[in-house]
Image (spheres, coloured by chain):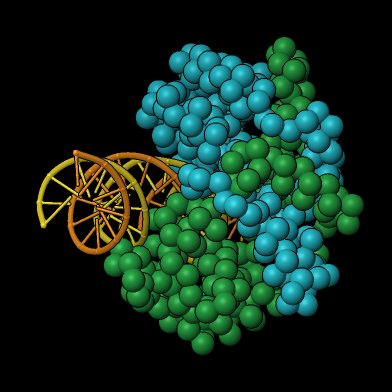
Chain colours: A cyan, B green, C yellow, D orange
Amino acid sequence: MGTPLPRDPIADARLNWERHGWSDVAAPMAAITAIMRTQQILLGRIEAVLRPFGLTFARYELLALLSFARSGALPMNKASALLQVHPTSVTNAVDRLQDAGLVIRSPHPTDGRTTLIELTPDGRALAKRATAVLNSEVFGQSGFGDQDVDQLIRILGTFRQNAGDFS
Amino acid sequence: MGTPLPRDPIADARLNWERHGWSDVAAPMAAITAIMRTQQILLGRIEAVLRPFGLTFARYELLALLSFARSGALPMNKASALLQVHPTSVTNAVDRLQDAGLVIRSPHPTDGRTTLIELTPDGRALAKRATAVLNSEVFGQSGFGDQDVDQLIRILGTFRQNAGDFS
DNA sequence: GCAATATACTAGGACATCCAAGGGTTTGGA
DNA sequence: TCCAAACCCTTGGATGTCCTAGTATATTGC
């Protein structure tokens, strides 16, 4: 994980696919593998930036989502849907954020099944500070050209829509 | 995680970023978030296809890598470097593959520190079957257009190279 | 030749994700 | 009205990833 490899391992995989007679799917295989690897690299950068704040990306995303909500509160199922993660992942994140005093659980006023997650003042302040650093250290130095950013947003947006993320 | 959302949550996040005066990094934020989400979707598809084989993506990748090695064997550190994951992740995968009888550990002939991972006949056969299904069910139906696949490979290839994955 | 440094793998711990299952609350049709 | 079906959240379990530390083996330098 330290020294760069002499050759692109994904390009090599693609060649292997072609050599084995799977040329028809070699390119998509390479694209998908590249997405997996890119995600890993980006997640590593993000986690490194958030670590000093005692946050992980999952917890940060939840804090950020809450900070954009008018009331600073959201039902857990709503958060799960918007973050597009399993409900149990939200439970897990809320547990830890609550232990850190960044959010509190409160009962829904009319639906006894639902739990609201509410940002505390500390949570709101931390979200703001973390976002500032994330913006300058990660998003502002993504390494993608402006045109490539547009291409990614377009290509992946279409993909996500076809995958049923939104309509 | 079931019903499509009425709106694209990442596009909404981008709007929120712009509303808060972070327009300069809103687009890269959206692109990066889209990569994270796309990876999640793709991983879900892959894991679903591999589950009947008793494999996960991490284990499959190791099997596939070994199946392309001339001798069907690789040192663990080599596998770690090529798969670009932490050495402990390889240890973990090898433990499980070995329990399943798909690989065996053997000592390196000249370097006492090194352990070779070797594909068993069962492992080789399973890798072949799993690859066939992945090709037809996932890579062959990626949902990306041919041109978009090329764009992804180009954009993410440059990114990975700049990130130090290879030279 | 021997000690210091580097390399290889593994053990233990923290987190995140998903799935399956369980208990409580609402809703809706008979 | 009342019970079954739907919905919401949590718990417990399996995996994967990384980090830190520890053990064993090689290599390097004095």
Any part of residue B123 in sight: yes
The residue nearer to you, when weighing B58 against A67, is B58
* Residue A115, above or below A20: above
The image position of residue B116, as x and y in percent, is 40, 71
The image position of residue A102, as x and y in percent, is 45, 23
- Kindly identify the residue that appears in the image at 67 percent across and 57 percent down: A10
The residue nearer to you, when weighing B39 against A136, is A136
The residue nearer to you, when weighing B135 against D29, is D29
- Kindly identify the residue that appears in the image at 56 percent across and 46 percent down: A4
Any part of residue B97 in sight: no
Total count of labels: 0
- Kindly identify the residue that appears in the image at 78 percent across and 60 percent down: A28
Return the residue found at the far bottom: B121
Quadrant of the image containing the C terminus of chain A: top right
The picture quadrant where one finds residue C15 is top left
The image position of residue B51, as x and y in percent, is 58, 71
The image position of residue A16, as x and y in percent, is 69, 70
The picture quadrant where one finds residue B134 is bottom right
* Residue B160, above or below A23: above
The residue nearer to you, when weighing B128 against C20, is B128
